[in-house]
Image (spheres, rainbow, N blue to C red):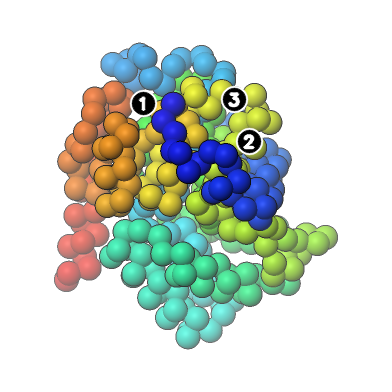
Amino acid sequence: MAALGWLTPRRRSATARSVLAGEASAEAARKTSQDAVADGSVDVSEEPEFPVLGDEQAAAFFDLDNTVMQGAALFHFGRGLYKRKFFETRDLAKFAWQQAWFRLAGVEDPEHMQDARDSALSIVKGHRVSELMSIGEEIYDEYMAERIWPGTRALAQAHLDAGQKVWLVTAAPVEIATVIARRLGLTGALGTVAESVDGVYTGRLVGEPLHGPAKAEAVRALAAAEGLDLSRCAAYSDSHNDIPMLSLVGHPYAINPDTKLRKHARAQDWRLRDYRTARKAAKVGLPAAAGVGAVAGGTAAAIALHRRRR
């Protein structure tokens, strides 16, 4: 299993708030997960060794933004809330700028992401959790469904077909992350937990956003609760911010990697795959069906770029 010196001991990379955020996310994920089966299947017969069929101690953890879905879930969620008059035009302009920057840069900027989360918390304060869950279903159909990378979706399905659980791990609110996981037929989601009292949001977080080291803590806590062997698990991400999470597992994958993650992955001999241009970045060993998804993902990206240029 790959490891980083600075990751051990754990406290060097995880604050008390990171641990709290991770444990809260793991608890929320286990409460809301469903053993759903996605429609359709992916033929993984050409890749019999990984994922390992019937390995109950193995699971897969997928980052969401730019890994499973093009763009940031939180920004798409903001667009949907604006449509429903949760906030004013000036706030939408801020969301739009943050999303545009994210898509151009292709990486997570902590300050931009924190601003977006602060905005979202202030917007949902006083609203019921059940209301946001219901709206999240609608927003998924409106803004998110067409932005799922087919190649990454094929990888997740390969784990499901092998009988393994598959979890999203994201800084997005756990409620919207749970909606996305359910719609994709995944097991569940680890996400940022917003505090609620009697089913109403208070406008505060439990711990901190599930970002960087907090993601690793969430995966660690969920693995312990589920009886998973992390050395037999896989993790997928596009961002160098998720190196702590990727380093926890025995099968780390860099998907649509940013520059820092690509460099690190090559140095650590991790598998890479880039669906943004349909090119195979490296390493045999990914399910063959994902190659088909790469072409579809690259085509979708090309169409989106063409539309933006018109």
| Residue linked to disc 3 | 228
Say what secondary structure mark 2 lies in: helix
Left or right side of 190 for 60: left
| Residue linked to disc 2 | 222
Q: Position of residue 18 (x, y in %)?
A: 62, 52
Q: Amino acid at mark 2?
A: Leu
Q: Position of residue 103 (x, y in %)?
A: 32, 63
Q: Amino acid at mark 1?
A: Val
Left or right side of 104 for 247: right
> Which mark is on residue 42?
1
- Residue density around tag 1, few if under 14, some if 14–19, many if 20 or more, within 10 Å: some
Badge 3 vs badge 2, beta-carbon distance below 8 Å: yes
Residue drawn at the location 27% of the way across and 45% of the way down: 263
Answer with mark 1 or mark 3, whichever residue precedes in sequence.
1
Answer with mark 1 or mark 2, whichever residue precedes in sequence.
1
Answer with mark 3 or mark 2, whichever residue precedes in sequence.
2
Instruction: Kindly tell me whether residue 179 is visible in this rendering.
Output: no
Q: Amino acid at mark 3?
A: Leu
Q: Position of residue 5 (x, y in %)?
A: 45, 39
Badge 1 vs badge 2, beta-carbon distance below 8 Å: no
Q: CA distance from mark 1 to mark 2?
A: 26 Å
Residue drawn at the location 68% of the way across and 44% of the way down: 23
Q: Position of residue 10 (x, y in %)?
A: 58, 41
Q: CA distance from mark 3 to mark 2?
A: 8 Å
Say what secondary structure mark 1 lies in: loop
